[in-house]
Image (spheres, coloured by chain):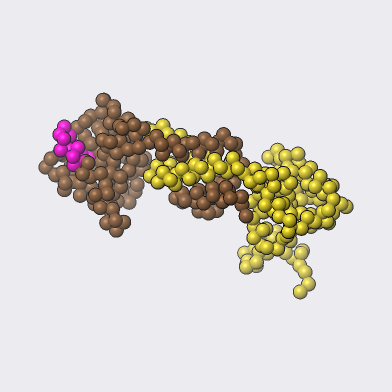
Chain colours: A brown, B yellow
């Protein structure tokens, strides 16, 4: 019924998370009506994010080159590594201004039920980083959820005795997402991190 | 904090209607994680819809060439024209399978408060189509809203005496509960009651 390019756009938009067919249709018609310039800017932004953004070869945070801006910053302390699940978890921690170390992005959390095993996360790479020396503390900042806790425990078991292991203080509501935490709560949680 | 291409994508996604910054961020990270193929297909679909889809030069429905598929179909009756506000209004009418005539897409509805005057809609083009002859009936299928009604009345005033003018029946939706019908709809259903 729609011209084929409209149907294709509705299908592609509908593949995005939380975008049902109705919403996809509404967005497609918005794009049809909008200025060419805006639509082409969106298309270009999608291409560019895939072409230009990869993972930091040290910490697996998002990076435009081989290293992310944090690993490339000589002012950051090399002694403390904050371990998070996803690249988007780095942002709220940086926003607190309370952390001056480096990160390690696991790429998820252990979840046997979803088939996510230690091999699927950047855990060996973390163990290797610690093995190269110079790291005194690992802050386990996985989410305060079942899978996040399990991941923190697993990593603590792997690294115990080699470095100080800390976990963000609870102060974060259990079941919450790190990504959506406000900076005051998260800052306090960081300041109050404790040994595990 | 994010690599620049990620921020640009979040900004562009956030320009879409109903997509706030949170949702834009979630979608951007989804696109980052997704296969290149899916992301490039979405980017291409956005470009192609703008490059390949325009408006039918006869009825102003969406079209891949100078004419839409409906105007180009010789089996459609040339005698009846159904007037709708937007291209997406054509779809539900086609889906009924009850209409075999042509369409005329106005591109909106009269709304002086939003600065939408008759000149902003394809009303002169409709009058010209009728003027070329061969049209016996105009079905005014603008929305049953204040602006849609005003638009229907305006067009009726322009074409009265030249063709038969009809309006979609207002009444209770099939399957609806009398108990939950709003009084305006129920009032119209009563006023439009017919013999059984």
Residue A173, percent from left and from top: 32, 48
- Residue beneath the point at 26% across and 28% down: A76
Residue B95, percent from left and from top: 64, 60
**Horizontal side, residue A65 vs residue B142: left or right:** left
* In front of the other: B41 or B168: B41
Residue A85, percent from left and from top: 30, 44
* In front of the other: A96 or A117: A117
The region drawn magenta spans: A126-139
The count of marks equals 0
**Horizontal side, residue A146 vs residue A40: left or right:** left
**Furthest residue toward top:** A75
**Horizontal side, residue A170 vs residue B51: left or right:** left
Evaluate whether residue B133 shows in this view: yes
* In front of the other: A140 or A135: A135
- Residue beneath the point at 57% across and 34% down: A37
Residue A124 picture quarter: top left
**Furthest residue toward left:** A161
Q: Is residue A136 located in the magenta-colored stretch of the structure?
A: yes
- Residue beneath the point at 84% across and 47% down: B131
Residue B48, percent from left and from top: 56, 42
**Horizontal side, residue A30 vs residue A176: left or right:** right
Q: Is residue A145 located in the magenta-colored stretch of the structure?
A: no
Q: Considering the image in quadrants, where does the N terminus of chain A appear? A: bottom right
């Amino acid at each position: 019924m729609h011209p084929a390019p409209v149907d294709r756009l509705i299908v592609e938009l509908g593949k995005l998370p939380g975008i049902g067919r109705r919403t996809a249709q509404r967005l497609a018609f918005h794009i049809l009506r909008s200025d060419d310039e805006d639509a082409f800017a969106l298309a270009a932004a999608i291409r560019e994010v895939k072409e230009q953004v990869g993972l930091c070869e040290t910490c697996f945070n998002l990076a435009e080159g081989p290293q992310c801006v944090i690993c490339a910053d000589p002012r950051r302390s090399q002694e403390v590594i904050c371990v998070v699940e996803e690249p988007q978890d780095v942002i709220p921690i940086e926003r607190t201004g309370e952390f001056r170390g480096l990160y390690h992005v696991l790429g998820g959390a252990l979840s046997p039920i979803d088939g996510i095993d230690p091999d699927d996360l950047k855990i060996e790479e973390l163990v290797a980083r610690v093995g190269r020396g110079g790291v005194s503390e690992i802050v386990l900042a996985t989410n305060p959820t079942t899978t996040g806790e399990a991941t923190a425990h697993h990593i603590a078991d792997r690294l115990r005795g080699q470095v100080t292991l800390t976990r963000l203080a609870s102060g974060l509501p259990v079941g919450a997402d790190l990504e959506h935490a406000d900076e005051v709560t998260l800052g306090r949680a960081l300041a109050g991190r404790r040994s595990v």
